[in-house]
Amino acid sequence: MEILSSDNDDTRTIRLSGRLDTLTAPELEGPLVEACESWQITVVDCEKLDYVSSAGLRVLLAGQKVASAKNHALRLINVSDGVREVFDITGFSRILSIE
């Protein structure tokens, strides 16, 4: 998985590509939690994300919890149909802000 980030005003955007799974989820956890803690808005661009496993879901949930605790926002954008289906089946589409 590749993780790229960029900043604009009060927003950090994290772009993911590849697979967010057991092997790669730990790579995202630190940058995502730090962004959700420090930035008013964290956007996770999933345009090039091919797959998300339960380990990936756990990391996204951790980011959401940190963002909520800080009264910040975590948003997912450009979510593919396959990844969206995982969010829908697991109920994460009701927890995460998916645009």
Image (cartoon, grey):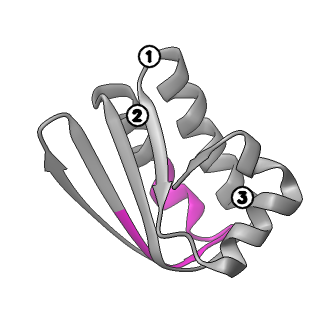
Q: Residues within 10 Å of mark 2 (few under 14, many from 20)?
A: many
At horizontal 30% and vertical 28% (from top left) the residue drawn is 40
Q: How many marks?
A: 3
Q: Residues within 10 Å of mark 3 (few under 14, many from 20)?
A: some
The correct choice, above or below, for 65 with respect to 95 in the image is above
**Residue 9 picture location, percent across and down:** 11, 38
**Residue 98 picture location, percent across and down:** 57, 53
In this view, the residue in front, 4 or 76, is: 76
At horizontal 59% and vertical 77% (from top left) the residue drawn is 80
**Residue 60 picture location, percent across and down:** 60, 48
- Residue on which the image places disc 1: 70
Residue at the extreme front: 99
Q: Amino acid at mark 2?
A: Cys
Q: Amino acid at mark 3?
A: Ala
Q: Earlier in the sequence, mark 3 or mark 1?
A: 3
Q: Is residue 50 left or right of residue 4?
A: right
In this view, the residue in front, 83 or 3, is: 83
At horizontal 70% and vertical 54% (from top left) the residue drawn is 57
Q: Look at the numbered disc 2 and give the secondary structure of its residue.
A: helix
- Residue on which the image places disc 3: 55
Q: Earlier in the sequence, mark 1 or mark 2?
A: 2
Magenta stretch contains residue 3: no
Are discs 1 and 2 less than 8 Å apart at CB? yes
Q: Amino acid at mark 1?
A: Lys
Q: CA distance from mark 2 to mark 3?
A: 18 Å
- Residue on which the image places disc 2: 36
- Image quadrant assignment for residue 95: top right
- Span shown in magenta: 15-29
